[in-house]
Amino acid sequence: MEVHVSKFRTQFPKILARLIPGSWRNALGGLIPETDWQDLEPDIYEQLTERLLNIHQLGPGLIEYAGQRKHRIGFFTQANSGAGWTVLGNITLRPKDRKKLFDPLVLSLIVHEMFHLREQSILMHLSMQGELDAWQYQCRTYPFLTTTGGAIGSRGEAYSDGEKTTLEIWEQLSNLSSASRADLENARDLMIAIAPGYRAYRLPIYPLPKEIWFHLRQGRFRAAATVIRSLFIGRPTA
């Protein structure tokens, strides 16, 4: 069954891309990037998987998942993040990172997205609760992806720029609880401080049904509508 599912994930976007007009492809790419991305070469993918399989600190669940499930990785321009997941269970990276796959930053982004795909439902992916868990996992595992053992955000490591570091912000983020609404609200600004332009305010605090119910039970119908609009359209400017 897994072989058939994997083959479907590989072939479906290619068939779809052949069927749709070229003028539609960019729009569809936002929903199914596989129709308009550049595939990672299979031999490089195998090297990448082998690298991750040797890092036992990632945890047995993710290591087993990485070894058994054949993700596809493709390069697709994305404005608000360094990597992403797709509804077909694959991972997207920025085209400019194609030659940096084994850099700690890019490895940590791949691990971040694998965590989403392995541990969470799609609705959990699309929430601050799911994102905080994934960011914290990325933070915990980052030192094992480097040759230096340095912490994420520290000088010379990912998310630092010369003397400017984000280590203290990562430490604050690591101490938050994904079970606390207040902590999840605070996490938004911390994530943006680390990665300016990140779409934290488009995501609901909790998975969409739970977040809508949170507002509806208090009679906050406009707030419930705003949650939906922010996720699918974007945050209002005023």
Image (cartoon, rainbow, N blue to C red):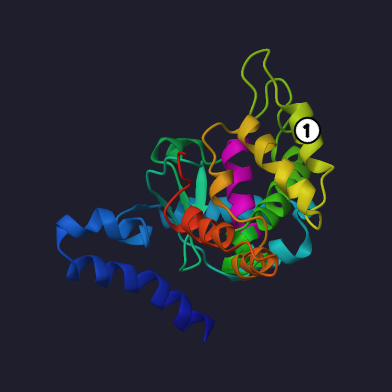
In the displayed structure image, the side of residue 224 where residue 14 appears, left or right = left
Is 108 inside the magenta-drawn segment? yes
In the displayed structure image, the side of residue 129 where residue 83 appears, left or right = left
Q: Is residue 221 above or below residue 11?
A: above
Is 201 inside the magenta-drawn segment? no
Main SS, magenta residues: helix
* Total numbered circles: 1
Frontmost residue, 205 versus 26 = 205
| Farthest-out residue, top | 163
Q: Position of residue 219 (x, y in %)?
A: 65, 66
Residue at the spot x=42%, y=40% of the render?
A: 79
Residue at the spot x=60%, y=60% of the render?
A: 125
Frontmost residue, 224 versus 185 = 224
Looking at the rendered structure, the kind of residue marked 1 is: Gly
| Residue bounds of the magenta highlight | 103-115
| Farthest-out residue, right | 175
| Farthest-out residue, front | 219
Residue carrying label 1: 149
Q: Position of residue 121 (x, y in %)?
A: 62, 69
In the displayed structure image, the side of residue 13 where residue 155 appears, left or right = right
Residue at the spot x=71%, y=46% of the render?
A: 185
Which quarter of the picture shows residue 146? top right
Q: Is residue 70 above or below residue 235?
A: below
Frontmost residue, 104 versus 238 = 238
Secondary element at tag 1 = loop
Q: Position of residue 95 (x, y in %)?
A: 39, 40
Q: Position of residue 184 (x, y in %)?
A: 73, 49
